[in-house]
Image (cartoon, grey):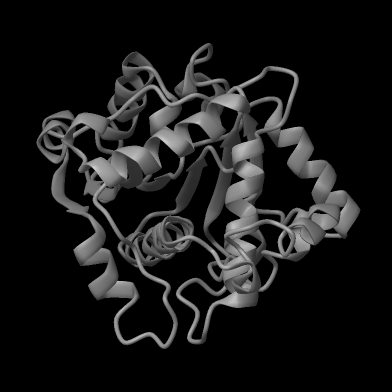
Amino acid sequence: MKNASPSLTALRVAMRRAAHQLYDAPPLVFNDPIAIQILGPHAVEIERTPGRNPANKPRPFSVSLRAFLVARSRYAEDLLADAFHGGATQYVLLGAGLDTFAHRNPYPSLRVFEVDHPATQPWKRELLRETGLKAPPNLTYVPVDFEQQLLADELHAAGFNAATPTFFAWLGVVPYLSLKAFRETLNFIAAHPRGSGVVFDYGQPRAVLPLHEQQARDSLTARVHVTGESFKLFFTPPQIAAELAAFRTLEDIGSPEINARFFANRTDSLQMIGSAGRIVSAWV
């Protein structure tokens, strides 16, 4: 991403999560009562943007992308609950963007570390000030450039305890990383005590997608490239399994599993289509 600018993709993800609160039929897959509030002045952009307001006749792939984004957040927080009840005392959001969990945290004893790019984090904190959302006492901000700084060093300096079970959410980040930065972060997570875990999403390579999905990927890639946050890293499920060899209890889910778990029997069109996006979790 551009060093002097906040992440535009983080804003777009947050707007889609907010759109879910406004436009999708109940029950909501991911209920976030402050998803709109945190956007501050950007909230007015939701209904003007094609693909978010049903009145604008959203394209199927746009609805599918929103479904993917809310499903991965729900999946991550479901697993966080499992981790917390299993003894985890820390939650690290890698590439936190405009995530709101720290302000909805139902676990008073859980420490939350929000890790993000040094340009994006001050932008978020300014939005929080503008909207009157105060940082809770168990939240710590940790600015990190994954390509230039060591995550372990920056977390340690912020008071993180590497000796206690920790759950990591790494959403919307992996496609933008180099393979080196991806592996260094995985190695860091794998070194944590038993009971620690990680959840992240990834995209499959263009070559393994059917033609209509390749065209949708090309369109998304072009839009992302304009923001200066280009895609770099893709995996197939066997490749991800190999990268996660040091972990146990691997779960890798795609559209069929995500739809069955989160979007079955809905009265609207919210569901995932295609095979490009997947979500994976693994435990130490």
Q: Quadrant of residue 267?
A: bottom left
- Left or right, 15 with respect to 87, comes to right
Q: Residue furthest top?
A: 148
Residue pictured at 32% horizontal, 65% vertical? 82
Pinpoint residue 229: horizontal percent, then vertical percent. Answer: 55, 26
Q: Is 251 situated above or below 262?
A: above
- Left or right, 157 with respect to 276, comes to right
**Label tally:** 0
Q: Quadrant of residue 179?
A: top left
Q: Quadrant of residue 143?
A: top right
Residue pictured at 75% horizontal, 53% vertical? 135
Q: Is 50 situated above or below 26?
A: above
Residue 163 visible in the shown view: no
Q: Is 152 situated above or below 28?
A: above
Pinpoint residue 22: horizontal percent, then vertical percent. Answer: 65, 75
Pinpoint residue 101: horizontal percent, then vertical percent. Answer: 58, 59
Q: Which quadrant, please, contains the N terminus?
A: top right
- Left or right, 64 with respect to 2, comes to left
Q: Which quadrant, please, contains the C terminus?
A: top left
Of residues 229 and 160, which is closer to you in this image? 229
Of residues 183 and 175, which is closer to you in this image? 175
Residue pictured at 47% horizontal, 63% vertical? 63
Of residues 77 and 264, which is closer to you in this image? 264
Residue pictured at 55% horizontal, 34% vertical? 223
Pinpoint residue 5: horizontal percent, then vertical percent. Answer: 74, 25
Q: Is 25 situated above or below 20?
A: below
Residue 142 visible in the shown view: yes
